[in-house]
Amino acid sequence: MRINALIVVLLTGLVAATFGFGIYLFAQLVPDMRASLGFDISYVGTLTAAGQFGYLTCALVAAWLTARLGGGWVIFGSGVVCAVALIGLSLAQNVLLIGVLLTLLAGTAATVFVPMVDVISRTVAFKYRGMAMGLVSSGTSYGVFINSLLVPLYAPQGEWRTVWWMVGLITAVIAIGVLFVFKRARLFADASDVNPSEPRVLGDPTAKVSKAAMMQPWVLMVWAMNFLLGFSTFPFQNYLSSYLRTELQFDVTYTAQIWASIGFVGMFAGLAVGGLSDRIGLRITMMLVYLCVGLASLILVVHPAGYWPLVAGVLFAIAFYPIFGLIPAYVSKMAGSAALAVTLFGVANIMQGVGGMLGNFSGGVLASVTGSFMGLYVAIGLVALVMAGLALRLPKEGDETPRATVVDAVNG
């Protein structure tokens, strides 16, 4: 039991590294890196677009790699690549090299997160998977929190390279921990090599997945939810500061307090909401989480005054961080094999990324045409209601025994 808990902690640390350091740290260090290296602000847009491409590409590659190497090796390898890329950024002098390294970092975020369905299903008891994946999904907030501590200490003195070096070192330590703990837990072995009498094993991750298994109604609904999730929650946070400061005229201090609250709540929301899902079920919990997004959007449309935007931020944090753990937890409980779970979750990540790109683009166009961000948050609220409806239509996750229909579909 102790080693299983340690595995979850290490996975949380890798999410903190690949998402928190690998994706979100650059945004905080852009002014300092530009002042030092002299690249244009337009190049920042190119870098972020390249990162999104890296994430989408590696989300698909991750499923392919996991089926051939196993989730343990893919996660460990991703941690090593992430550490090397972060340290590389501390030494980089060329903006093209920086772009390549940032694209690699975004890719490792996908190649760490997608195989976690395989690893969690092999190490965490069925009834605790919601809480485990909820904690793992909150890893991003821990990484962002560490960023907020390091950047003010070093960036003002022009020592932005030190920040990259330190987070790279932290990631290297986590990767070394993964190597030893995963080896002890036999996560570098094939699922077929593990004692089949142990209920923690979901199935052989190298098994062939048929088209029939991939086209089940619940699978299609999960993909639809992931698309809508990216379409709604990504623009919610990307345009939040612009809405608060330019349209609602809140000052930068209050806006920063809202973001600080989102990050702080996110550090605990994954574990708390994940634990709740183990008690009341993943379907109902996902429905409640989507309603939180809808309620947060409603507040920003109907009464965005006083402390209410802060309440909206807290509601969004309660939903945003846990949901990325609830969906893979549901997948791990519904799929009859690790191969099916990893493959469909890889596709789900691609759908999520595409939805995020379309949502950000559409949100910008809508705000530009209407001259207000209010319509965007109305749309987000409506999408949240659709997601809540989809969650209720999902079949209830059953017991630990895989469904015969799914197994038959996988086996052909």
Image (cartoon, rainbow, N blue to C red):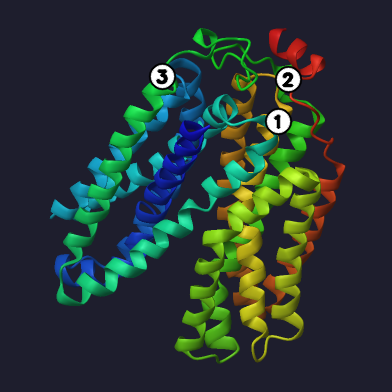
* Vertical relation: 237 (above or below) 331: below
Mark 3 residue element: loop
* Residue under numbered circle 2: 213
Q: Which residue is mark 1?
A: 333
Q: Is residue 354 above or below residue 69?
A: below
**Foreground tag (3 vs 2):** 3
**Would residue 86 appear left or right of 262 to someone viewing this image?**
left
- What's the distance in space between the residues labelled 2 and 1, CA to CA? 15 Å
Tell how many labels.
3
Residue placed under numbered mark 3 in the picture: 188
Q: Position of residue 104 (x, y in %)?
A: 33, 42
Which quarter shows the C terminus? top right
Label 1 Cα neighbours within 10 Å, binned few <14 / some 14-19 / many ≥20:
many
In this view, the residue in front, 103 or 269, is: 269
Binning the other alpha carbons within 10 Å of mark 2 as few (below 14), some (14 to 19) or many (20 upward) gives: many
Label 1 secondary element? helix
Determine if residue 230 is in view. Answer: no
| Dot placed on the residue nearer the N-terminal end, 3 or 1 | 3
Circle 2: residue type: Ala
* Image-based side of 155 in relation to 380, left or right: left
User: Separation of disc 3 and disc 2 at Cα?
Assistant: 26 Å
Give the residue displayed 49% in from the left and 91% down from the top: 251
